[in-house]
Structures are given as structure tokens and as C-alpha cells.
Image: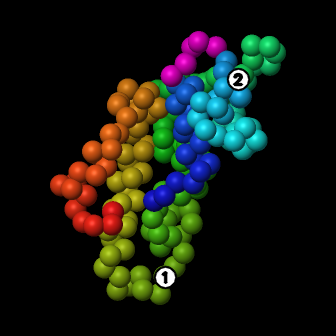
Amino acid sequence: MKVSKKSDYALRVLFSLVEKYGTGPISIRELAAENDVPKSFLEHILLDLKEMGWVNSASGKYGGYFLSKSPDEIRMGQVVRRFENNLAPINCVSVLQYEKCDQETKCRFRRIFLQIRNDTASMMDNATLASVYAGSPVQLQEVMDQELVGGDGI
């Protein structure tokens, strides 16, 4: 699964709001600059987040956006599904965007993609913004660790 820029930006902004949870609103200008998100694109994302009840806004000189729910109540799976509609790597194992494939009755590798979908959904649905924020950022050596990569071109 590869997430879109919209999901990426939504998660960036949500984690900025988690970081400042309970300290008051953050301006859209500050959120855009801090997260390298185009302000015009961020406006649409924040409207979606607001529609979901995850963020709210305050107007005025010191206005901006803030989390309207506790970081313990928002799960990464919810956020990604809002913007992607799908966690499945291929459509023949998707619930929401299922597409029949003429190879379904004999396909062996489909099972692996189904397991990937299930494992991804489980991990993301169990990951609250609070629990993810409590972790540490991924280091480059973790990404490049040859023992974990298991093959060229990952």
C-alpha cells in the first residue's frame, strides 16, 4: 500500500496537533509551514478532518485549528481510510473496492496480498495517534538494514 500526498499531509498535520494538544489553536499558516504542506491544499484537508470530527477551529487573531478529540480516540486506520478509501494492496482483496479477477480461482499469491491487507488494517486500526506519537522517528539505518530488507529493490 502506498499512501497519497493527501493522507501523508493529513497525518503530518494531525501529529503537529497531537504535539500541541491542549495548548490552544494553531494557525493554518503555521501548520502549513511546519509540515511542508501547500496552504491551499491544507485547507481542503482540514475541512475533511473537521468533517470527521477530529479537528475543530477557532476564529480570530489567535485562532486556528486544534484536535477536537483526544489523540487516544483517533486511529491511523481511520485517517488513511478517509483519504484512501482502501488499505488493500490490490483490488481483488479489497472490501470497498473489490474487483473480480479472472485468475481468482487459481491465484496463489492473492493470499499473501490478503494477509498484507489484514495485517496492515490490524496494525493501523490498533495504532492511535497518541501511541504512534509516543514512539520515536524511524532512523535511516532502520530503513536500510539489510537483515530486514530481505532483498534488493525494496
Tag 1's secondary structure?
Answer: loop
Specify start and end residues of the magenta stretch as a single range.
19-24
| Position of residue 152 measured from the top left corner of the image (x, y, whole percent) | 27, 67
| Position of residue 141 measured from the top left corner of the image (x, y, whole percent) | 27, 45
Q: Quadrant of the C terminus?
A: bottom left
Amino acid type, callout 1: Cys
Q: Is residue 73 visible?
A: no
**Along the polypeptide, which appears first: circle 2 or circle 1?**
2
- Residue drawn at the location 56% of the way across and 62% of the way down: 96
How would you classify the magenta stretch by its main secondary structure? Answer: loop
Q: In which quarter of the image is residue 48?
A: top right
Q: Mark 2 points at which residue?
A: 27
Q: Out of 124 and 41, give the one closest to the viewer.
A: 41
**Image side of residue 109 versus residue 94, left or right:** left
Q: Is residue 70 above or below residue 118?
A: above
Q: Quadrant of the N terminus?
A: bottom left
- Residue drawn at the location 35% of the way across and 30% of the way down: 135
Circle on res. 101? 1
- Residue drawn at the location 34% of the way across and 54% of the way down: 119
- Taking the magenta stretch, the answer to whether it contains residue 8 is no
Tag 2's secondary structure?
Answer: loop
Q: Out of 110 and 27, give the one closest to the viewer.
A: 27
